[in-house]
Amino acid sequence: MDALLIVGAYLLGAIPFGLVVGKLAGMDVRTAGSGNIGATNVNRLLGKKLGLVTLVADMVKGIVPMVAAGWLVADPARRDLVVVLCGAAAFLGHLFPVYLKFRGGKGVATALGIFLYLAPLAALSAAALFVAVVYNWGYVSLGSLTAALFMPGLVWLLYRAPAPALLALGLGVLIWLKHRDNIGRLMRHEEKSWRKKEPS
């Protein structure tokens, strides 16, 4: 049962909701903008409403497998570990989806969903940090990187829970690796800011 829950979490996490939303709107989001299947690119290409739909869907696919594991794993000694592993599997599904030849998104929304379930106060604190960074500097990628950097410490500080803190660390490392192109553009001052209009 545990293995089935973890595999199911990966397969659910691998559903590319941004791509699905884009296709329903008549666009392959991989061919425009940043080429990413996440909510930020969908928002830029198709507007705020569809960007929000993608954001919520990517968050929910991180939450649902953990809720299912919490319900279905009867043994309290195993339950917490299986829940964390289901969250990790859903996140890896988003980053490396089998349906798209393992080329997925950057995982920020899915990670937010995971920690809204596992450590809600830490997730909300990280989200507030994200908003503050984006508001002040205009870079979504910088906000994502900052939130990912501080999340392990927030989880440990607020919950003293080793497994979720280690999960936050692992997810944070992967988020940073997935943002390596953004990091390069930030360092070269070439990253797109939401405060600046695109050149015509």
Image: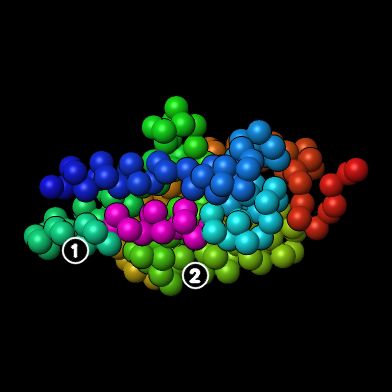
**Amino acid marked by disc 2:** Leu
**Amino acid marked by disc 1:** Trp
The vertical placement of 160 against 185, above or below, is below
For discs 1 and 2, the disc positioned in front in the rendered view:
1
The vertical placement of 87 against 117, above or below, is above
Which residue is under mark 2?
124
- The residue carrying pointer 2 sits among few (fewer than 14), some (14 to 19) or many (20 or more) residues within 10 Å by Cα, namely some
Tell me the SS state at disc 2: helix
Q: Does the magenta stretch include residue 85?
A: no
Tell me the SS state at disc 1: helix
Closer-to-camera residue (24/136): 24
Closer-to-camera residue (21/111): 21
Q: How many marks?
A: 2
**Image quadrant of residue 156?**
bottom left
Q: Give the range drawn in magenta.
A: 55-66
Give the percent coordinates (x, y) of residue 70.
21, 62
Which residue does the image show at 39% across and 32% down from the upper left? Answer: 98
Q: Is residue 5 left or right of residue 148?
A: left
Of the two numbered discs 1 and 2 on the same chain, state the one appearing first in sequence. Answer: 1
**Image quadrant of residue 23?**
top right
Image quadrant where one finds the C terminus? top right
Give the percent coordinates (x, y) of residue 46.
68, 51
Which residue is under mark 1?
71
Which residue does the image show at 58% across and 52% down from the upper left? Answer: 39
The vertical placement of 70 against 104, above or below, is below
Which residue does the image show at 66% across and 67% down from the upper left? Answer: 132
Q: Determine whether label 1 and label 2 are within 8 Å by CB.
A: no
What secondary structure predominates along the stretch shown in magenta?
helix
